[in-house]
Amino acid sequence: MVKVAFYPGCVAKGSCPELYTSSIKVCEKLGIELAELEDVGCTGAGVLSSEISDPINARTLAKAEQMGVPLMTICSTCTGVIALANVRLQDPEYRDKINREFLAEDGLEYKGTTEVKHLLWVLVEDVGLDVLTAASTQPLEGVKISPFYGCYLRRPDEAIKDGNRKSYIEKVTQAIGGTNVDISGKGKCCGFPSLTINEENALAMTAKHTSEARDKGADAMVVPCPLCHLELDGQQSRAEAQEKQDIDMPILHLSQLVGMALGFTPSEMEVQRHFVSTKNVEEKVKSLAVTAS
Amino acid sequence: MQVTMKFVRTKNEDPDQRDSFVVDVDPETSVFEAMSKVREEQDGSLAFRGTCNTGFCGDCTCQANGKRVVPCLVKVKDSVKEDAIEIKLIRNVAPVKDVLYDVDQFMWKKYKYFRPWLETNGTAPAVKDEDLEPVRLAMRCTVCGLCDEGCTVIDVDKEFLGPMALTKGLYRTTKDPRDQDTKQRFIEAGEKKGLWDCVHCWEASEHCPWGINPTHLIMDLRDDSIALGVKSGKGNPMAARHYNAFADSVKKSGWLNERMLASKTYGLPPYGLSLSGMMSQMPIALKAIRKGKASLRPHKSRPGARQIAKIFAKVEQSHKNKKA
Amino acid sequence: MRYDVVVIGAGIAGLQAAVEARRQGASVAVITKVHPLRSYSITIQDGINAALAQGDSPQAHIADTLRSGDGLNDKSVVEAYCAEAPAAVRELYNLGVPFNLDPQGDVALVKLQGSEQARAAHVHDMTGHVLAQVLYEQALKYEVVFFEEWYVPSLAVEDGVCTGALAFQLSTGNLDLISGGAIVMAAGGVRRLYEPSTSSTHCNADGIGIAYRAGAQLVDMEMVQYHPSIIKAGRLAISELLLANGAQLEGKDGQAVTGSAQPFGHSLARAAAEAIASGAGEDGNLNLKTSITQEQADTTYYNTNARLQMFMKGNLAGDPIPVHPGMYRILGGIATDASGATSVSGLFAAGECAGTGFHGAGAMDGNGLLASVLSGHRAGSAAANAGKASTGEASPAILQEHQGKLKPLLERDAKEGDLAGVRSELTSLMHEKAGLSRDAAGLAEAAEKIASLKESYATMGIPTKALSFNYALQQHLETRTLLAAAEAIVGSAEARQESRGVHYRSDFPDKSDEAGSMRVVVEQGEGGPQVSSRPV
């Protein structure tokens, strides 16, 4: 049993409710005890100036510190931004300044000890791949999955800390019986941060990654970040229009993929909320379920 | 040792060209020495750049056996695979001949965009040594191009000014306390294809061989620009609208109100009306409602919203003080 | 195409000349075969000397420079440069060079070998790198016209006046004529003439060779300086800053190798070569050991250390670094007066290719960058005056003549590898016979060999016929300048029958008052170099 301070992030509570639901179910089944942090703010997502986001994140880290457990997110962008803030906050002088100027009046102090983890890292490091395999009542045999990390679970090194983490998705998909389909852009940007600023670039990135996964025969892509999901799933039809091609590549949240292997039905994982139909994956999973029974 | 040097010769029209050469080289010397040896002894028509031979000039960047490298700093013995080294162009560049590419389009033009010289009014302000350290960091850059080579944005948009130019052009000048034109530089840098087109994917930092960490510098530049009240250039209003909408949302409720973010950024009701915004994002918004992804319930503030608003107020006040 | 001033070469000296000429209102073009920020200057790590410290004075700087130069310096040039140095460094700072500063916010100064004072301003261990950048920034600001990746094979000289430069655009192979009211030659050194060396592939004696072939006098060409510590199997010279801060050379059994005479680096190089010859080395290398901390390795010596780590997984803080001596720079070159004017009217010279007399028989660390900046400054200024006053333009007949010569060269039968053969013979010949130790027999043998290499070179063609980026053609022309510089060096070294500064004759191991009162001058003659002398 592992306990974490759960930081779901804005999008899981907003446009990707399926991520929230599926994560809660998966964690419950795997014995990850979630203590959800309510009184915390947005990480800044790399949009807000770090002058603003560092104090907000220090506040979040301090609240997790009080609980004495790691902070777990289900969003790569949240992980990356808050982990980078945490790296800066290891500098005692800087941390003191933030504590003094922003946290003290709230009766808080961050001592610099909180560990930031993504669900993916908790699955591999705290739950364990063998446990995951054992818990997979419905291994995803024959399901071809293209891992898409996006940016923040691969870089920067000072936030990732352990280079092995850069290949965790593949390990998880293997552990639950799936087959990995490697694409060249798996560690590149999905396009989301550019969506409002340079939409053409954002859609070009989306088309590039999703079409590569399709060309390599993937049944679905799996993402550890709801922003990647909003982009690759939500904007895929517009990317198709811009780049004048049919792509039709289903995008699954990491929690949904794991959940299906753990025996949840696709609809329990709320795949029906996606824009791009996940029908092919659902059918494969259903047929696996039939064989299994 | 005997090494087979293979060159992927792009845009070379000579029908008799050779692309594979056996050379005798000391395995301790650099891949660039081996490349040069081939060109000098066996085929003077081979085209590639490279000058200083010590990793300072950044001119010889290429792929050696699939790795993107500055070949004068890689030993033959560390690169060779099955007695061979394959040399080819880096990505994201327009080939000219063999392993030589259009470096002007790839980097120099972009560098010049930022007017990379200091604008001073003759009076040198008092400067502390540590004030100049960021300038030294940017000037350490050798323009090897490996950051732009790995840039996710340049990958889809060759005109994005990119991490090299942002580092050596914009960061170098705006971080220099002797420069007198910082605000105008940020206004110019805020135009399309500039500072705000970066997606902060951290590829540049991973690719830079010199520990310059360009992505970090770009984020730092954004912070500096925001502190001066410049959130984009005049011809690039979306960047500023997006920032303002994002900041407003977090300031008001402690977290992101996605509906408000989209509406304010694109100019949708109730925050404004923009035909292009309606055209691009309305169908997505409607679909989101249908799929149960966009809740119609009112956006609730986080419990700590008041504390977060105070953080905003303090930082904004410090910016005002800075400007005054 | 005509400009008031045409500068050939875009290292520190060329850029400084161009900027100064623009400031004085001249129209300026710079022709450079590599992008300015790829020039050899950007590899120079040590500092730039200026008597800025309290207690230091131009007089003290002069005294140190003269001691290093061992009696051969042009004293008036030394006095002028040392007096101008403080203002030059302040100006560089104001233009944007982020010099390291002391706690008071003044330019921090370090003591390099040969100086009695802390006198070198520096930007960590990348001073040349940064100086070149800032001067390039200024050249952009002043809208200097750049012909980037254009190679100059010859000067246009009509009736004894230099009126322009022939230049190939490397991307098209087109030969063109660029006229100038005044020409500044700033095309760098001769590193490719020696092996081992800190070679940039592009330091092919272009400036010296072209000017020599155009009739200019060269001076002090026998003064070839070696560096004591070039990394094993590489080209990187370990920062002079380190040698000034206690770095030691050791043989394989830990025996210390030290230099004693001025200039220190060269003297250490000679000692290192002797130690290696007597078996103290391992694979021809000694070990360089420093006492610096990891923090210093990561800051002050970052640029050196990062390259070491990348290339040989070595770390200056702790690891012994295998190094060997190699040729570093030439102290003589195209003879100039204090303004940078050469013996050819209309032609000026600056930087390493210029024989200003500043260094004499030995260059002190930190004076090299100073000479590049100040000789560039002066040549740019003098060329601006001359160029603005001139209305001359090179005659198109010169272009036709050169195009006419080029055609048969390209048509001639040629074999791959012939030119490389000439060059590799030349580099080992120069190192062995005209390097750290010379004698009459060896120099005579070298002279003979160079003459025969010239003969075989004269029949060689260009195997590659393509126009775009024809490296073989460039290599052919660069071999010509290398041969020219080689015969000038050997001829000068034969003439100096004594040992002084960096010039060591094993058959004349001592100084001679008579030889020490003269500078060796060399010009191109009918059958080879014409050597003469002039008083110091």
Image (cartoon, rainbow, N blue to C red):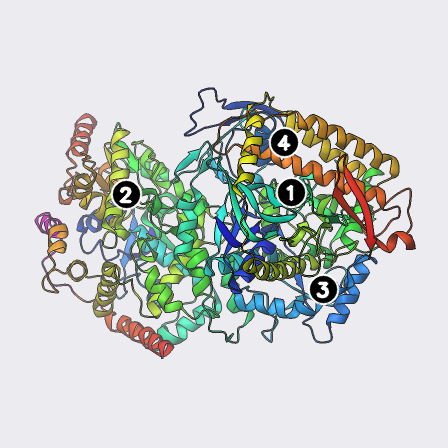
The vertical placement of C489 against B275, above or below, is above
Check disc 2 and give the amino acid type. Met
| Tally of numbered tags | 4
> Chain for mark 4?
B
Secondary structure at badge 1 equals helix
Give the magenta part as a residue range.
B282-299
The quarter holding residue A187 reads top left
Q: Residues within 10 Å of mark 3 (few under 14, many from 20)?
A: some
Q: Position of residue B2 (x, y in %)?
A: 61, 24
Given the image, what chain letter belongs to the residue carrying mark 2? A
Q: Is residue B5 visible?
A: yes
* Residue type, numbered disc 4: Pro
Q: Which residue is mark 4?
A: B27
Left or right of C233: which side holds B116?
left
Question: Do discs 3 and 2 belong to a common subunit?
Answer: no
N-term mark: 3 or 1: 3
What mark, if any, has residue A205 been given in the picture? 2
| Image disc number at residue C210 | 1
Mark 4 or 1: the one toward you? 1
Circles 3 and 1: CB distance less than 8 Å? no
Type of residue at label 1? Ile
Tags 2 and 1 both on a single chain: no
Residue B118 percent location from the top left of the image:
47, 65
Q: Which subunit holds the residue at mark 3?
A: C
Position of the C terminus of chain C by quadrant: bottom right
Q: Are marks 4 and 1 in contact (CB under 8 Å)?
A: no
Which percent across, then down, holds residue C533?
A: 82, 50
Circle 4 SS class: loop
Q: Is A40 rendered above or below residue A207? A: below
Give left or right: position of A225 versus C289. Answer: left
The picture quadrant where one finds residue C494 is top right
